[in-house]
Amino acid sequence: ADPGLTVRLLRVVNSALFGYRGTVDSVQRAVQILGLQQVHDIVLGVSLKGVFDSLRPSEVDVDRYWRQSMMCALCARQIARESTHATPERMFIIGLLANIGHLVMYQTAPALAAEAADAAEKGEALHLAERRIIGCDFAEVGATLMDHWGVPRGFAGAIGAQTLPRLGGDYANEAAIIHLAGAIARADETGAASAEVLAGIDATLWPLIGIETEAVPKVREDAELNLAACMVLFFPLLKR
């Protein structure tokens, strides 16, 4: 019923991200090949930016936010592939949504969100600064939004537990993947080395993540190689 959304969906499905290269010419065909749930996830991903278009640049650097989110998504997908996770494409969408709680905070409590960000720049963990200043953190807000949107429970489970993956219950593996993917994405933005990423990951999380530490540079390299193309694919109107 929405021609624009249909075009964006088919563009993603026929991209190198999925590898079908022009063979999917309708939503019905996409459902036949990918399944209804995966098509649902892709539609959610390509619809994201429009939900938050009302944000003013003075409150948050939207381009920077979506770039880091895409980096997190690509890292989550590659970690899932390296760990033989059953649904790496779903992990891509969960990674894209992982930091969505920040945008909600900037819409509802911009001054407090900015104060928490300033505290994080001075060395305090961002989620701890948010809890201290706002009373909740971005992971909690993101999980609540996922529940409100009615998406599958795994989204809220992984996003809500990403700061403490061991508390993720049935979704601890997904939460741990997002935890690592987010750390790599932040390192990419600041120019930090992969060794710094590894140093910041609790050693007890690696069995949950499901990959060896030696795989992290490869995960990062793969994500960096695909970042520009995926930004054009999902967010074509953003500044480069």
Image (cartoon, rainbow, N blue to C red):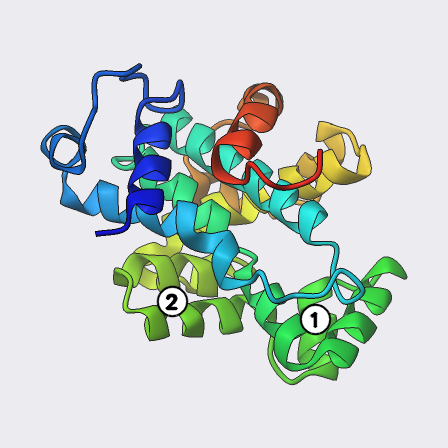
Residue 83 % position (x, y): 38, 29
Q: Residues within 10 Å of mark 1 (few under 14, many from 20)?
A: some
Q: Amino acid at mark 2?
A: Met
Is 64 rendered above or below residue 122? above
Question: Which image quarter holds the C terminus?
Answer: top right
Determine whether, in the image, residue 31 is placed left or right of residue 172.
left
Identify the element where label 2 is drawn.
helix
Circle 1: residue type: Leu
Could you say where residue 101 lies in the image, as x and y percent from the top left?
A: 56, 66
Q: Position of residue 76 (x, y in %)?
A: 47, 38
Q: Disc 2 designates what residue?
A: 146
Residue linked to disc 1:
128
Among the two numbered marks 1 and 2 on one chain, the one whose residue lies closer to the N terminus: 1
Instruction: Using the rendered image of the protein, determine whether residue 161 is visible from the camera's viewpoint.
Output: no
Q: Look at the picture and state if 14 lies above or below 68.
A: above
Taking depth in this image into account, of 147 and 44 the one nearest to the observer is 44
Q: Quadrant of residue 107?
A: bottom right
| In front of the other: 142 or 124 | 142
Left-right relation of 182 to 195:
left
At a point 77% along the width and 29% down the height, the residue shown is 193
Q: Position of residue 111 (x, y in %)?
A: 78, 79
Q: Visible in this render: residue 222?
A: yes
